[in-house]
Image: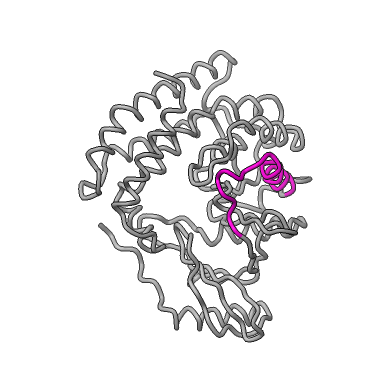
Amino acid sequence: MAAALASPDDATLLAQAAGLTAEADRPAPVALEQLSGGRNNRVFRLTLADDSSLVLKSYFRHQHDPRDRLGAEWDFLTFAWARGVRCLPEPLACDRAAQLGLYGFVGGAKLPPEGIARSHVEAAADFVCAVNQGTRPRAALKPGSEACFSLADHLERVDRRVERLRRLDPQAPHVEAAAALVADRLVPHWQGVKTDVMEACSAAGATLEAAFPESEIIASPSDFGFHNALWQSGRGLTFLDFEYAGWDDPAKLAGDFFNCPEIPTPPEHFGLFVETLSRRLALGEAAHARMYLLRDAYRIKWACIVLNDFLPHDDARRHFANQGDREARCAVQLAKAESLIAKTAPV
């Protein structure tokens, strides 16, 4: 298994942070504390000489994962801030060579899964609409991670994730159970979902490869959900973590938002979210229908994602972020994957 690039030690990070705080015209940092919860990156609270706080983010890099996580997050944050959106951290400075970003510190706590209400889903939809208000100049952002601009793209992205799971790490804990789940449940369900999408496309007189109109493409926060949000009394929700953000199909955003299992968005609010985006962003009937059509496809996609702990490269990424014992993670992820697969239409 290839190793991730070595992480700088705290002293080096503090010195690099000093350069970024100077660039942002802020006091020098005097201490840093690693925060919990980062799944792909290392996130630190910086204490400055005036006792104020900022966030320093060190982005994961791997020879087999060339994604520009810093670039995607920085570009999305600056794009949103330029449009007056403030329910997300302020971008202050970045060091692309060192893969470091400096951001405003936002307090608050994650909402409990049982505490997600209609008002929170409305706030999430408002956020997406605010970022996409007015014109959406394509030069402002790059495509999001695994962006989809046709139905063929959606199916190919899930196909690729399913195929990856045919080659699990033989050293992973519970790998036999994971292999059985993939072969006996995930693959058959995905074939059924895929057939349904293809038949619906054919019935509409369309082709899978037809590109979506520019008017149906939005600036997507991607990996969007309440696992990446903090609640603070008097401020409301602040949305975080945009390392996969960029131009994308809103059907992918809706599918991700309602299927990420960490802090699930209640499914009874799916219609609210879809109708709000469709109406306020004038997405049209095709985009509206697509969000419903691809709902099961994204359940399968997220079943694949939660099984990533059985892949050796993903374990290297989790190790970088200090995500704890792999055996415990794998057991939990198996249960999550089974739950997602069970929600798809029967085969």
**In the displayed image of the protein, which residue is found farthest to the front?**
114
> Considering only vertical position in the picture, is 54 above or below 190?
below
Quarter of the rendering occupied by the N terminus: bottom left
User: At which x and y percent is residue 266?
Assistant: 59, 36
> Considering only vertical position in the picture, is 329 above or below 25?
above
Instruction: From the viewer's side, name the closer residue of 41 and 267.
Output: 267
Side of 57 relative to 320 (left or right): right
> Considering only vertical position in the picture, is 299 above or below 38?
above
**Which of the 4 image quarters holds residue 101?**
bottom right
User: At which x and y percent is residue 158?
Assistant: 43, 35
- The total of numbered circles placed on residues is 0
Residue 239 on the magenta span: no
Instruction: From the viewer's side, name the closer residue of 109 and 160.
Output: 109
Instruction: From the viewer's side, name the closer residue of 334 and 149.
Output: 334
Q: What scheme was used to colour the molecule?
A: one colour
Q: Residue at the location (58% across, 33% down)?
A: 267
**Which of the 4 image quarters holds residue 212?**
top right
Main SS class of the magenta portion in the image:
helix
Quarter of the rendering occupied by the C terminus: top left
Side of 20 relative to 215 (left or right): left
Write the start and end of the magenta stretch as one range: 109-130
Q: Residue at the location (71% across, 49% down)?
A: 131
Q: Residue at the location (62% across, 86% down)?
A: 49
> Considering only vertical position in the picture, is 197 above or below 235?
above
User: At which x and y percent is residue 285?
Assistant: 69, 24
Residue 122 on the magenta span: yes
Q: Residue at the location (57% across, 81% down)?
A: 19
